[in-house]
Image (cartoon, rainbow, N blue to C red):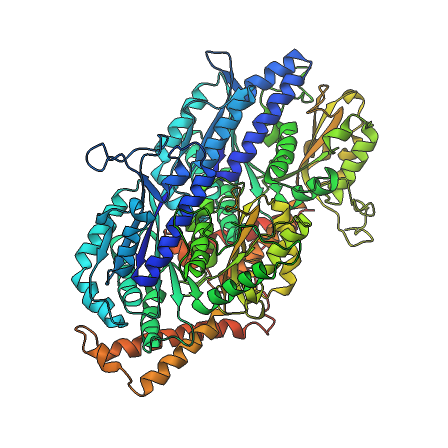
Amino acid sequence: MTQSVVVQVGQCGNQVGCRFWDLALREHAYVNKKGLYDEALSSFFRNVDSRKSAGGACGVGGRIQHLKARAVLVDMEEGVVNEILQGPLREVFDSTQLLTDVSGSGNNWAAGHMTYGSAYREQILDKLRKAAEHCDCLQCFFLIHSMGGGTGSGLGTRVLSLLEEEFPEVCRIVTSIYPSAEDDVITSPYNSVLAMRELTEHADCVLPVENQSLVDIVSKIQLMSHSAKPGSVIKRDSTVISGQGGISGPEKPFDAMNNIVANLLLNITSSARFEGSLNMDLNEIAMNLVPFPRLHYLVPSLTPLYTLADVSVPTRRLDQMFSDAFSKDHQLIRADPKHSLYLACALMVRGNVQVSDLRRNIERLRPSLPFVSWNQEGWKTGLCSVPPVGHSHSLLALANNTCVKPTFMELREHFTRLYRKKAHLHHYLHVEGMEQSFFSEAIASLSSLIEEYHHLDATKARLIPDAPRLSIAT
Amino acid sequence: MSVVTLQLGQCGNQVAHQLFHVVCSDAQNAHKKTYRAESCERFFHQNTHGELVARAVLVDMEPKVINHSLSEAARSGRWRYGESSHFSQKQGSGNNWANGYCVHGPRHRDVVEELVRREVERCDRLAGLVAMMSVAGGTGSGVGAYVTQCLRDIYPTSFIINHLTWPYGTGEVIVQNYNSVLTLAHLYQLSDAILVHENDTVHRICSQLLNIKHISFSDVNRVIAHQLGSVLQPALTTDSHGVYSRNPLGELVSALACHPEYKLLSMCTIPQMPSSSIAYSTFSWPALLKHLRQMLISNTKMEEGIDWQVRPPGGSGRSMGLTGGSFNTSLANLLILRGKDVYSAETGGFEDPALYTSWLSSKEAFNSWKSPVPFNKYEKSATLVSNSQALLRPLDDMVGKAWNMFASRAYIHQYTKYGISEEDFLDSFTSLEQVLSSYRHLC
């Protein structure tokens, strides 16, 4: 079995990461009743016996001694990481996995990327190497960061290129939290566009998540659970925003939103951790969903968002789960994949679902979903037999879809509005190593990315004839 | 004589596991001692505790499926896999044929070859090797093609047959058509015969004949294993004089794959029904064979929805069914009959020269094997293995879809990363177009 290392950078990255570790522990505690350190646990956790010298790592099969997260936590201020260290999750992290500074990046991509990136380069590499050494088959790095601020966006993308440099063979899946349109950080369009270029060039896959979508989903679930129609009571631990059963105490603001992203990461890795009749390994994601290297933005959607306590018709509920995955309301960015063009789509199913359920739903939904001409059957599926806590089944859909284009265009527009007036530019140009060309190159990279999606979109309306086949002399 | 089976990748391991399950329970339920003994020798050896151990080598690039198979088999109490006849790694091939063929295959060549050698040396006499895999993923297809190539080098004179599971037309792996094209093009140079099961067809059998509501992969694999078992279990050939054929793979190859340009074998079995209905059903050989013959010529893979309008061409060229289904020309057919009154079965309908290409006499083109022992609980059952145009359409679809994708160069960077160039793709496309053309012009 393979292992993955989570690298969480910046305030947002660490908060999301924190929720991830809490829910990951909850999930494994739920599945693993024997208290043995098994292969599934080993993919995200080390088992350490503190009585033994030299780290005292224990092999798979023994009793759980002391679980340590395969994680590297980086932040340029101390707040969030200190909070983690005083909270219930402190046990799963070693001080050697942490890296903090005191002064923060001041919402400045350049400060994160250039200043801290250079100052902490060796220390970060050292921590990454340590984490990698603890794995016997490291398959994937999960980078969690936000796009709008300074540390997550700037230093986060610097870490990404370090990963590529140092571990070119290991898959890099980045979860990027995109700012809402009315972000309180004025420079967030700059930070986001500068970060986008790095993501486009150095990530294998990017899972874009928009703050606003998370807010919408949370309020939808809360509305549902407060309306309390008879028979529509939501089971307590069955929503994607719930931390019930985790070891963290009372919920903090943003926990609900961050739990959604944590669930995304749990579901994307479930098939690599648990058994199933159709395994889907992490390296299959990019292989199936990324037809062209730069177009690796995969829009995630999670269903069901909650499970009702009453038992209604199971098949209908199951089919509803598949329909929902394609609806606008369930996407983790504000986008409408149904009315854009699919390049490829993955359905990662967990729980009691059979291949015939999958086939029936693909056949049912296919006619309403536009796929690019050369990939009319661009479906990748995985069946993992272990459902998430509180659910009987769940679905994560990953869509490589041109519906990301409006988000990127909006970003470009906000960037251009600032850049035209050269607003705040001097804050960036003061930073050593930062030049104005970074801005022009970043916006050019984003524009060409938009253009590539645009070209594909343009094929949507046209009927593309099959390519003429090779002819054989008979 | 014994057959050594290679289980490659998730699909190959799951299907082969079912196959051993089927042949073992079939043999143990059989009343004839000679049948039982011959079947056991063919697929199993006995260890020092007297347990039946499958003559199998399990290969996968990730451990979950193999671990599952090993423990499932041991739990059955009837047979098991060898203690050290498996090889797995930690990280799969990621649906990438190039990763399997260019990286994992060569890297683990020695280990796998050694496992096969040990298994072969355990056989008193080797009938040949069967490599089972899917064509869609990365390990079964990529490592499978590479390992087949190595085996061809080590055992140049042994029979090597590949059993391939073709993916659903949609929804398993997005790059499946690329992987399929690369696999088939390579295997076509190496394999003595290529037995094919299509998931879509088997899925329909599960839903329409077996009435399974929620079809799982185990259901699909059980059907494949049933059909394959009915071919590979002991049977009497025409000239075996009452003794079970000693050389099942050789006989299969010589009966069906007589020309190197034609190696694709499809199969269909009749009857297939829910196990609860078997006891209440009676069959007659004439009815079974009449259906089976029509399934052959109208290219229907199950007894439901047969197009009875399709007729072999008379003196005057091609004939079409009223519903547009066209006649399926055969190069060669092998009919395997098992069960009660098997010697009374009249197989003349399959000897009609009109079913076959003009350049082989029906005597050469048609063979039949028989066994009076009922197979897998069916009082009577008939399986037809056919080298015909039956796979032309699905193969053409596969190549067509892959070619369309190739025209926009989508996903190619994933393959070039591991050393498969656009040229390699073109070579594979060319050789499969050649195969398609040969089958298309079969008459």
The residue lying at 16 percent from left, 73 percent from top is A432
Residue A148 shown left or right of residue A236 in the figure = left
The quadrant of the image that shows the N terminus of chain B is top right
Vertical side of B242 occupied by A174: above or below: below
- Answer whether residue B255 is visible to the viewer in this image: yes
Vertical side of A462 occupied by B37: above or below: above
Residue A211 percent coordinates (x, y): 43, 67
Residue lying furthest bottom: A421
- Answer whether residue B250 is visible to the viewer in this image: no
Front residue of A142/B101: it is A142
Residue B60 percent coordinates (x, y): 44, 37
Residue B2 percent coordinates (x, y): 53, 21
The residue lying at 42 percent from left, 72 percent from top is A180
Front residue of B95/A393: it is A393
Residue B126 percent coordinates (x, y): 50, 22
Vertical side of B33 occupied by A392: above or below: below
* Circle count: 0
